[in-house]
Image (cartoon, helix red, strand yellow):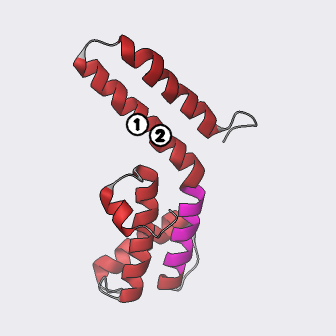
Amino acid sequence: MALGFPSDRQLLEAIRQFLKEEVQPAITDPAVAYRLKVAANSLSIVARECEQSEALSQLEQTRFSQLLAVQGDAEELNRQMAQALRDGALDAADPEVLTALKEIALAKLAIDNPRYSSYQALAPSGS
């Protein structure tokens, strides 16, 4: 978390912009150009994580807590949810489980790459 101005997202965007606008045009080696593109895209993912990871964690905590009928932090509830699905304590075909997992998967896709066509097709309007 940034301590003030500029924000984490602004810092990451400045680095990404520098790489794409100033460094990329100077690169002639296709392998290096590809790695630079991967690095710039990675910076975009990290920026979205900075912005959205707290909301994702809260969503997981809320939804998994409801399904498991227990309290805990998102990481622990995620482990418990996976175990409950493996053990058959929760049915993966249950509409409530499917709805929660879809909602969480879409939130993760929004961070990873909101331009994925599958995300665009499934995301609620306005996302």
Q: Is residue 9 above or below residue 62?
A: above
Query: Which mark is drawn over residue 115?
Result: none
Q: Nearer the viewer, residue 87 or 53?
A: 53
Q: Nearer the viewer, residue 21 or 82?
A: 21
Determine whether, in the image, residue 93 is placed left or right of residue 68: left
Identity of the residue drawn at 25% across and 14% down: 29
**x and y percentages locating residue 119 in the rendered image:** 36, 61
Q: Is residue 35 magenta?
A: no
Q: State the image quarter where residue 8 is shown.
A: top right
Determine whether, in the image, residue 39 is placed left or right of residue 73: left
Q: Is residue 24 above or below residue 1?
A: above
Determine whether, in the image, residue 20 is placed left or right of residue 1: left
Near mark 2 (Cα within 10 A), the count class, few <14, some 14-19 or many ≥20, is many
The residue to which callout 1 is attached is: 41
**x and y percentages locating residue 26 in the rendered image:** 37, 11
Residue bounds of the magenta highlight:
53-65
Q: Give the amino acid at mark 2.
A: Ser
**x and y percentages locating residue 92 in the rendered image:** 31, 82
Identity of the residue drawn at 52% across and 49% down: 49
Q: Does the residue at mark 1 contact the one at mark 2 (Cβ under 8 Å)?
A: yes
Q: Secondary structure at mark 1?
A: helix
Residue at the left extreme, as displayed = 30
Q: Is residue 72 above or below residue 21?
A: below
Q: State the image quarter where residue 110 is shown.
A: bottom left
Near mark 1 (Cα within 10 A), the count class, few <14, some 14-19 or many ≥20, is some
Residue at the right extreme, as displayed = 4
Alpha carbons under labels 1 and 2: distance apart: 5 Å
Q: Give the amino acid at mark 1.
A: Asn
Q: Report how many numbered discs are placed on residues in the image.
A: 2
The residue to which callout 2 is attached is: 44
Identity of the residue drawn at 59% across and 50% down: 51
Q: Secondary structure at mark 2?
A: helix
